[in-house]
Each structure stands twice: as C-alpha cells, then as structure tokens.
Image: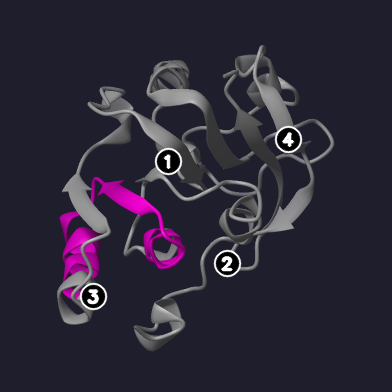
Amino acid sequence: MSADLNQKYGLNPAHSEVVSACELVSPGDALDMGCSNGRNALYLAQRGFKVTAVDVNPGALGQLQSIISQEGMDAITPRLYDISDAELDADYDFIACTVTLMFIHPSRVDAVLADMQQRTRAGGYNLIVCAMDSPDYPCPMNFPFTFEPGQLSAAYEGWELLKYNEDLGTMHNGARLQFATMLARKPA
C-alpha cells in the first residue's frame, strides 16, 4: 500500500489534529464523522484503525469507495449517514469530528455530542474541531453553527481533556477564525 494514499488520490492531507491524536490513541474502532472524500479515514486506516466513515454526501462517499476498491482495503466502511440524526448504531474507541459540526443545525448539536459520548467506549476518545464565534473573533463565515467560548469544554464535563484550546486557525480556503479544538478521553 502506498505510504500516503491522500497524496496519491489528490486529497488534502489528514487534519493535523487527527494526525496528532494518533500519537496518543491506540488503533481500534474509529468513526470519522462527516468524512467527505475520506482524507481522515484513509489516514486512520493506514495506522491500523478499523474505520467507519460517514457522510451525508453520496458523491464524496463514492469517491472514497472508489479508492477503497482500487487499494483493496477492508479497514474502511463508508456509510451514508446524516450526523444530525444523532442515532449512531455502534460503539467506538475513537470518534473524530473535525470541521463538521459547524455545518449542522444548531438545534441538533447537543444531541449529536450526547450521542457521540454515549457511543464512545469507556476509555475511548472524542476529537472535535469546530469553528467558534466570540466577541473578540466574530466568525467571518456564515456557518449554521459555531461554538461560544467554553461551550465545548462544558459539554465534556467529567471527561479527561487531553487537549483543549480555543485558538485562531486558518480554514483550507484561507479564512482566519477561532476554533474550539478538543481531544477528550471518556472515563474508563
């Protein structure tokens, strides 16, 4: 298998937070929420995770399925799923949700977070990266949802926050905005 499938298929590299989470999180069952064309799923699979990759876009999933077929991979299962439904049907050791929550309706975010937490095995991890909107840094993009300062960490009270920050970052389109970034471990 090629060292970097993302490069081979012209995809963006895996999200930097997924890459750094892999330094702490041992391979197991992973869920890539809002996988798009699979940049994070491919990275995780190459590191020994068994990945369920879900997205609401059938075209993106088709692209990922094409790569899986060409590479003869069995570590990734693409599934059409709207994360807004908050009805995951399996448990995971690692759930990654990077730059995805800001595209769902604000009224569904609490349910999605609760579902992620419930479907994370004891001792498992949630990784979330999401845009913020704060008085100091109003969000320049018109996302349906953005976190307020402290909102994400409050939602994970009782979990071990291995990484948490609300730093400025840059979207892949160059827009500068504040992100809530969290890697949390569920109590064992």
Q: Residue under circle 4? A: 162
Residue pushed farthest right?
136
Lower sequence index among marks 4 and 3? 3
Q: Tell me: residue 121, above or below residue 28.
A: above
Tell me which numbered mark, 2 or 1, is placed earlier along the sequence: 1
C-alpha gap between disc 2 and disc 3 = 22 Å
Lower sequence index among marks 2 and 3: 3
* CB atoms of marks 2 and 1 within 8 Å: no
Disc 4 from disc 1: Cα separation: 25 Å
Q: Nearer the viewer, residue 168 or 53?
A: 53
Q: How is the image coloured?
A: one colour
The amino acid type, in three-letter code, at marker 1 is Phe
Mark 3, residue position: 67
Q: Residue at x 33, y 51 (%)?
A: 51
At a point 18% along the width and 75% down the height, the residue shown is 72
Disc 4 and disc 3 in contact, CB within 8 angstroms = no
| Count of residue discs | 4
Q: Quadrant of the C terminus?
A: top right
Q: Earlier in the sequence, mark 1 or mark 3?
A: 3
Q: Residue at x 49, y 39 (%)?
A: 102
Relative placement, left or right, of 104 versus 79 is right
Label 1's element? helix
Pinpoint residue 69: horizontal percent, then vertical percent: 15, 74
Q: Which residue is mark 1?
A: 103
Check disc 3 and give the amino acid type: Ile
Depth order, front residue of 140/188: 188
Residue 54 falls within the magenta-colored stretch: yes
Single out the mark in the foreground, 4 or 1. 4
Q: Quadrant of the N terminus?
A: bottom left
Q: Which residues are magenta?
A: 41-66
